[in-house]
Amino acid sequence: MKEKIFSLGNATILILFYLLFGVTYISAILSDNFTIGDNLKRGTTTTLGLLVFLSIILLFISLVYFLPKVKKAVVFVFKQHKNITSIALFVLLVLLQFLFVTVFHPKIGWDPSALINTLDHVDDVNNRAYFSLNSNNLPILLFMSFVSNVFQLKTWLFFDYLTIVMVDLSIIFSVATSYMIDRRYFAVSLYIHILVFGVFPWIVIPYTDTWVLPFVSAFLFFYFSAKKVSKLWQKNILMTLFALLVCGTYFIKPSAIIPAIAIGLIEALSLFKEKRVLLPEVLKKTSTVLIVMFSFICLYTITQNKIEHQTLIHVNRERAIPAVHFMNMGISGDGGYNAQDTLKMGELATKSEKIEYSKQMYVKRLKKLGVVGYFHFIILKQINNTADGSFAWGKEGHFIQGDQIPNSHGLKGVLENYLYIYGKNVANFRFIAQFIWLIILSCIFFGWHNKSQTTQTIRLGITGAFLFLLLFEGGRSRYIIQFLPLFLLGASLLINDSKQIIKEITDATLLKRTNYESK
């Protein structure tokens, strides 16, 4: 019976994962980011520069494939000396990130603007109103205030530099996790992270999406490290660090603890795998669980008390927006931000009124959609939530302050043309970002033969992220950023399995075509 429950649980994870991930993968392939020439939907067009870029890639692949000396050199640099090469490329990436941010650090609109503006204007009535409504952003405000006081800096450039540090710490922890699971994955994991974060302009946006990344990567690292050690005291220390980081993650961005929930569910499911459970093992696991719970509760209590008694800015907690509001927005329009609902939250005086309004609107919208309509809505929302490889760059309201029309020269002018919504090369950026995202998704998608506990943990974490974004506010792929450690770890661990499947599919297709032509 226990084995059946274990098998059923794993089968359920795999089926649910591929149902949702399949929608993401197909829609990523069909994305309008891949439009060559005029994109009527976005009002953009690709330029000659993209064709040159693609031609260079094709030329490089051709040289490697047809010229043995070139192939030998590539293998020597990127395979035989992969550890040295990958580390060197990571150092180069960090240098280029700092150069990029030094040249291009525009003032951002939406939530990041409220955070940084409040540091200098804590008594402003608009800032007080914002944090009274959006009390979930109080922890990150307090953290920003602490850091700015330590360094005596409050500029956009300073916080952009800090965002680079956060992102690169995440890379280090994620690659270390791959190494901890299997040291053979070190270089390929670092290559994958460099590929993604080499085209990642979100480092100029100091907000919870990027600042939570090192916390997620770190608690994944300590969990998988705990799985590798045999001594109980070592395991308990690592799991204590895991619990503390999960708690920190919760305060920065609550939804980012979904991978930790997946870990708990997988550990619970694994109990059904063992035919006999010995008492000493039960006591060991129980002690670890109790330590994790105790560590989390202690830090949560201390941090929550600090937030409730903070004196940085005066807030009215009765005006806080409830969680059900985000579920209500998540079922409206394309499942994303709804200005009308947000305005209503500002108009209603008490939290109970906000909850009641959001519940009524949620039920009303759900009934209006019906069963078939809701199913159709969910598919479209899954596409909007996950398919865009630029992570919806430029989609937020007042994304970058100003008119976003490039007017600079030199390197800054080049970057503005690639990243401003009215830049002539923004479609090129989206194409390249989409291409890289498709590579990452492919590395995960085709690894279906690998059903180890590690990969199932990653699959369940990704599935949990998908389900959360389907239930709550989504509508654009920016919210996937917080879960990138899961995607990149999954791509790192499954790339070899996926390569084998892709090779088998390619060989079978070519063989079938050859047999057909010979007839």
Image (cartoon, rainbow, N blue to C red):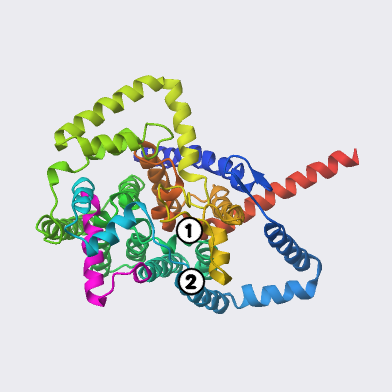
Residue at the (25%, 40%) spot, across then down: 323
| 296 falls in the magenta region | no
**Residue 148 visible to an observer of this rendering:** yes
Residue pictured at 45% horizontal, 29% vertical: 377
Q: Position of residue 268 (x, y in %)?
A: 30, 47
In the image, residue 224 sits, relative to residue 319, either above or below, namely below
Apparent side of residue 301 relative to residue 425 in the rendered image (left or right)? left
Q: Position of residue 72 (x, y in %)?
A: 73, 75
Res 236 visible: no
Mark 2 or mark 1: whose residue is earlier in sequence: 2
How many labels, in total?
2
The crowd level at tag 2 (other Cα within 10 Å; few <14, some 14-19, many 20+) is: some
Q: Residue at x 45, y 27 (%)?
A: 375
Vertical side of 398 occupied by 485: above or below: below
Mark 1 residue crowding within 10 angstroms, few (<14) / some (14–19) / many (20+):
many
User: Magenta residues: mostly which secondary structure?
Assistant: helix
Residue for badge 1: 488
Quarter of the image for residue 362 reads: top left
- Residue designated by label 2: 103
Identify the magenta region: 135-159
> Could you say where residue 370 lies in the image, as x and y percent from the top left?
40, 20
Task: Identify residue type, mark 2.
Answer: Val
Q: Is residue 399 left or right of residue 126?
A: right
In front of the other: 241 or 409: 409
Q: Classify mark 2: helix, strand or loop.
A: helix
Of 309 and 99, the residue lying toward us: 99
Quadrant in the picture for the C terminus: top right
